[in-house]
Image (cartoon, helix red, strand yellow):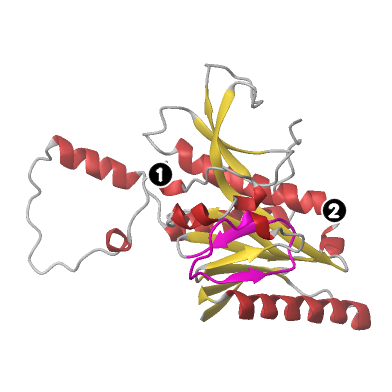
């Protein structure tokens, strides 16, 4: 499990964990939160908040009030009871998980503020990717819902400037949320499906919703594979490039609008850091 910590500003750091098993990650996250609570209570210290960027090994997690009935099929993937809110979900490779270890009282954020900032940060990044995609001809966009935490994709059914969801069809869910608050400190966080295998969701009712269609970003925008992100070494002198054929030109155009797992991750970290610093204000929450 690789651990790479980077300062984002004076009061926020990021920590990256790869191939992370769930239980030791949860234990470390809780231990760090309890340590911060104690430092604040005993010494009045405000410690930097933390974003944990996690690539989990495959796991199903069942929230504090989670119901076993939402697990439809037992597989080889472990099922872990955890202390966050919400029902059952899956974590694994190709899914971006970010845990928010924030001192909400010092930020003067309510729990509702925390949830809204998380949802709106995800909306911002997904919609930015969708707007950059030349294939988004159906005017697909990402939105949160008041009645069900998370971020969902919608397609327009009519040409309109109306920002409500009345003229949109919900396609499915791309991102899930689940937090735990202890003495004004948050932990746990968000999970966004980027280029993961969605078949793992077939064994559960995702987040407790039977029949909920789970989506991933790579089915709506071009995402680079590992081989495409690494340019091969040149073994011969560069030659004058021949005139591109139409398929080659299309491929180059697609690559210019493609994203990697890392670039999407960095977009989200940057957005969250600006919100943490007070540089991005909450938008008004749409009615149900």
Q: In terms of depth relative to the viewer, which is nearer, 248 or 152? A: 152
Residue 181 as seen in the image, left or right of residue 87: right
| Residue 273 can be seen in this image | no
90 magenta-colored:
yes
Q: Which residue is mark 2?
A: 110
Q: Position of residue 247 (x, y in %)?
A: 17, 38
Dividing the picture into quadrants, the one containing residue 282 is top right
Compare residues 247 and 6 and report the one nearer the observer: 247
Residue 108: % across, % down? 86, 56
Bin the neighbour count of mark 2 within 10 Å (Cα to Cα): few under 14, some 14-19, many 20 and up. Answer: few
- Is 200 or 42 nearer to us in this picture? 200
Instruction: Indicate whether 207 appears above or below 65.
Output: above
* Residue at screen point 32% across, 58% down: 225
Q: Dot 2: what SS? A: loop
Closest to the camera, between mark 1 and mark 2, is 1
User: Where are the magenta residues, as a range?
Assistant: 70-92
Q: Earlier in the sequence, mark 1 or mark 2?
A: 2
Q: Is residue 189 magenta?
A: no
Residue 284, above or below 260: above
The residue shown at (75%, 68%) is: 83
Residue 110 rendering spot, x and y as whole percentages: 85, 53
Q: What mark, if any, has residue 57 been given in the picture?
A: none
Residue 207 visible in this rendered orientation of the protein: yes
Label of residue 219 in the image: 1
């Amino acid at each position: 499990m690789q651990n790479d910590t980077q300062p984002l500003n004076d009061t926020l750091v990021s920590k990256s964990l790869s191939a992370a098993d769930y239980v030791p990650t949860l234990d470390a996250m809780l231990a760090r939160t309890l340590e911060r609570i104690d430092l604040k209570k005993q010494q009045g210290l405000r410690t930097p908040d933390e974003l944990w960027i996690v690539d989990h090994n495959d796991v199903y997690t069942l929230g504090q009030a989670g119901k076993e009935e939402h697990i439809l099929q037992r597989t080889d993937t472990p099922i872990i009871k955890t202390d966050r809110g919400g029902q059952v979900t899956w974590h694994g490779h190709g899914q971006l998980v970010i845990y928010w270890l924030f001192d909400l009282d010092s930020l003067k954020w309510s729990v509702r503020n925390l949830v809204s900032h998380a949802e709106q940060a995800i909306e911002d990044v997904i919609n930015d990717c969708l707007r950059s995609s030349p294939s988004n001809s159906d005017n697909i966009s990402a939105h949160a819902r008041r009645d069900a935490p998370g971020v969902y994709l919608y397609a327009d059914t009519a040409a309109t400037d109306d920002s409500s969801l009345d003229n949109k069809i919900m396609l499915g869910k791309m991102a899930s949320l689940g937090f735990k608050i202890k003495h004004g400190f948050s932990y746990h966080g968000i999970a966004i499906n980027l280029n993961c295998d969605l078949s793992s969701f077939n064994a559960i009712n995702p987040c407790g919703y039977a029949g909920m269609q789970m989506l991933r970003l790579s089915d709506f925008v071009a995402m680079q594979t590992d081989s495409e992100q690494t340019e091969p070494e040149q073994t011969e002198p560069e030659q004058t490039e021949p005139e591109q054929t139409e398929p080659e030109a299309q491929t180059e155009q697609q690559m210019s609008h493609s994203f990697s797992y890392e670039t999407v991750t960095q977009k989200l970290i940057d957005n969250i850091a600006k919100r943490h610093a007070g540089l991005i204000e909450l938008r008004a929450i749409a009615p149900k």
